[in-house]
Image: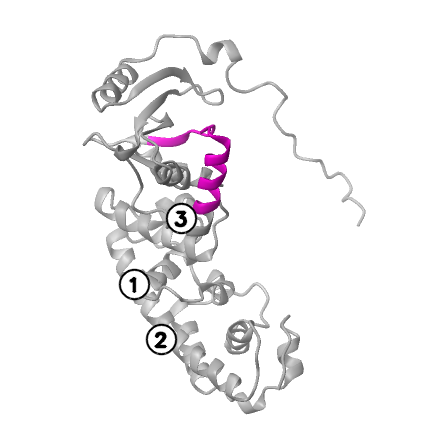
Amino acid sequence: MAKKAGARKKKGPEPLSRGLTPRQVATGSPPAAIEKLAAAVVADGGSVIGTYRDPLGGHWQLLVGLPIDKVQPTPFQRDLSDSHLERLARSLDKLDRFLDPIVAVRRDDGTYWTSNGNHRRAAVAALGGRSITALLVPDAAMAYEILALNIEKAHNVREKSLEAIRMARDLAALDPAPERQYADLFEEPSFLTLGACYEKRGRFAGGAYQPVLKRIEAFLAAKLPSALDTRDGRARALLELDDAVNAAVSALKERGFESPYLKAFVVARINPLRFQRGKTAEFDATIEKMTAAALEFDASKVKSEQLARTGGPAAE
C-alpha cells in the first residue's frame, strides 16, 4: 500500500542524547542511602564490589557479592523449569565462570530477593556455589518492575498468569490500591483470572481461552483485595466451563478424532463473539453462554474437515 499522503514517520530520540557519559557512570559521591545499603550488605556477610550510576537514568546502584543461601526468588514469579535449570547448570559448569549477575533487592530481614535471575541463582546453588554476584537495586519496590526484564526463558501463558496472580496477592497485603493501577505490572487482565485458574488446576489449558478472555476482561476499579475475590469467582466460572469443554473433547475422541487442537476447536465453536470482529462483551454473561453451549455440544455433527481447518490433522 502506498503511504498515506502527508503521513510522517514518528521521530525517535536523537542519537547519543540520553543518559550519562561513561565517565559519569563511575563518578560522583553516592547518597547516604546507598552508603547505608552498602554497610548492610557487608553486615549480611556480603561484599560491595562497587557503586555506580545507572547509565540510562542516573540512579545509584551497587554491584555486590552475596551469600547464595541468602538469595531467594520473589514469591510471586514463575516456577523453575527443571530442563532449563539443567541446561544452564551444565553450561556454567563447563565455562567455569559466572558472567551474568542477577538483579536483586534487599529485604529488611537481611535476605535478598531476585526477580531477574532465579534460574541462574538455582544453577549456581546446584553446582555447590557459595556466593553470587548481583546488581543490587536500592528500592525494594522495584522487585515488581524488574520482572519485566526477565528474558532468561520465554514466558508461556501459564507462567505469565501465575506470576500476575502471585504479584496481585502479594501487593494486596502491601499496598491494596485499585487493580487497574497496576495494569503495567500485570500486562493483561486475563492473566489474573487465568492465574487463579492455574492455582486450582495445574494442568489447565489457559491458552485455549485467552482469545475470548481478551475481549471480555478489563482491569478492575476495585482495590486489590476485593478485585481478587472477583478474580477467584471468575476462575471458578471458567473452570466450570473447562469441565464442560473437556466433556465435549472426550466425546470427539470417542468418535475417533485425534488432534492437539480439539480443545481450541471446541472453545472456538462455542465462542459467541467468534464472528463479531472487535466486539467486546461482559464476562459473566459470555462465560455462562459458553458453558451452556459446551454442555449442549453435539460431537456427532462435527466433520473431520471442520477440525482440519483449525490447523491440526483430524482422522475418524
**What mark, if any, has residue 313 been given in the picture?**
none
Q: Quadrant of residue 278?
A: bottom right
Q: Please give the range of residues in magenta.
A: 85-104
Residue 133 magenta-drawn?
no
Q: Earlier in the sequence, mark 1 or mark 3?
A: 3
Q: Is residue 104 above or below residue 182?
A: above
Outermost residue toward the bottom in this view: 300
Secondary structure, mark 2, is helix
Q: Which residue is mark 1?
A: 232
Rendered view: 100 above or below 27: below
Q: CA distance from mark 2 to mark 3?
A: 24 Å
Q: CA distance from mark 2 to mark 1?
A: 13 Å
Q: Which amino acid lies under the numbered mark 2 shown in the image of this protein?
A: Glu
**Residue 186, labelled with which disc?**
3
Q: Position of residue 230 (x, y in %)?
A: 30, 62
Calculate the distance from the C-alpha at mark 1 to the C-alpha at mark 3. 16 Å
Q: Which residue is mark 2?
A: 240
User: Along the polypeptide, which appears first: circle 2 or circle 3?
Assistant: 3
